[in-house]
Amino acid sequence: MLGDRVYADHAATSPMLPEVREAWLRASSTAGNPSSLHTSGRAARRVVEEARESIAADLNARPSSVVFTSGGTEADNLAVKGLFWAARDRGVAPRILASSIEHHAVLDPVEWLEKHEGADVSWVPVDRAGLVHPEWIAETIGQAAGDVALTTVMWANNEIGTVEPVHEIARICREARVPFHTDAVQVLGQVPIDITSLGAAAVTISSHKVGGPVGIGALIIDIAQQFTPVIHGGGQEREIRSGTLDCAAAAGFAAAVRTAVAAQAEHAARMRSLQAALITGILGAVPDAILNGGHDEFRLPGNVHFTFPGCEGDALLMLLDAAGIDCSTGSACTAGIPEPSHVLLATGVADSLARSSLRFSLGRTSGDDDVARIVAALPAAVDRAKRAGGRMGS
Ligand code: PLP
């Protein structure tokens, strides 16, 4: 519970942790610009470098590989555009392999490169559970004789929670010398992350998904890889990402990562048990509900994603909101018109069913009472949403 509300939208953002607020507040009294050479500047630089070292140690990466950004969206843009442009400068074919279920922070830059920069995009298909099959990537890279600018496949999907076989994909890409980027925004704190053993060219993380401040994230890079910057300016972050570093946000981010990594195993086990209770409860309360995504280790521990046939997802969301429950449809809304989720469509779900879906994402504030309240509120909400849908259709 979060106050008197059931907060089941941790995948959108997770409330700030007390230890993060403390670290953030402490660092916010640092006066200098981390790039300044004087004593105050050096003090601010120390805060940033300690945060960098802490995040690197928690994820088994080298401190020099942590490039701070304004969040997951910017890190994804830097990975996709930065790797693409650098490959093109080396004379590599402008070919991108991207999974069809990426977050818009990856999907849109890929489409932008296709439209404006001549990228030749192969969309990696997924199965009904949302899983990418590494053989498809191996085969496609093989056909291109390794002449590929980058491959990008998210570590776990933000809507249906499917956890992808990124270690296998990273190995295939490494052997073919194709830079591999993965968006790990949703896995941080839910699944163990070991950057060195993954061996990717770039990994995206974001602070606010694990109780850190909004507005900071990182791209963790293989320092041997070239990245053409997206943001030019003062040359900070070794000229990969210019802009004055926010030392308070960096300190808060490091505290959030530290807590997320230290608590990961225990947190995942607790989420698994709540997840199982919520799935069983929903299937019991709404027998025609359809569970989307993968099972067991192929699903994020905090994710529960259902289709409720006959209901408009947005209507259901608002009815649950009125019952004190915060959840999400996961799909984008363009100019006020609800769009069916590209993720569900990619898994083969029909357009009408894709519009009838809801995501409950559990997290640190979730407990048995949250599960009980969702299960208790759903039947009446589904019933009303179905009746409203029927009226609209007639
Ligand atoms: N990637 C994934 C998988 C996400 O879920 C999100 C946030 O929803 C992002 C990227 C964007 O991160 P940020 O909100 O830090 O820009």
Image: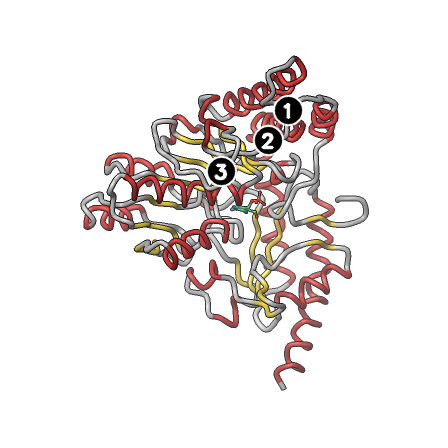
Q: Say which residue appears at 49% left-offset and 51% top-offset.
A: 103
57 relative to 320, above or below: above
Q: Is residue 236 left or right of residue 371?
A: left
Are the residues at dot 2 and dot 1 in contact (C-beta closer than 8 Å)? Answer: yes
Please name the amino acid that badge 3 sits on: His
* Residue 306 drawn at (x, y percent): 56, 59
Q: Secondary structure at mark 1?
A: loop
* Residue 24 drawn at (x, y percent): 70, 27
Mark 2 and mark 1: Cα distance apart in space = 7 Å
Q: Say which residue appears at 52% left-offset and 72% top-offset.
A: 352
**What residue would you read off at disc 3?**
232
The earlier-in-sequence mark between 3 and 1 is: 1
The earlier-in-sequence mark between 2 and 1 is: 1
265 relative to 36, above or below: below
Mark 3 and mark 2: Cα distance apart in space = 12 Å
Q: Secondary structure at mark 2?
A: loop
**CB at disc 3 and ligand 1 closer than 8 Å:** no
**What residue would you read off at disc 1?**
33
The earlier-in-sequence mark between 3 and 2 is: 3
**What residue would you read off at disc 2?**
244
Which of these two is toward me, 113 or 125? Answer: 113
Crowdedness near tag 2: few (<14), some (14–19) or many (≥20) residues, C-alpha within 10 Å? some
Which of these two is toward me, 159 or 296? Answer: 159
Please name the amino acid that badge 1 sits on: Asn
Q: How many marks?
A: 3
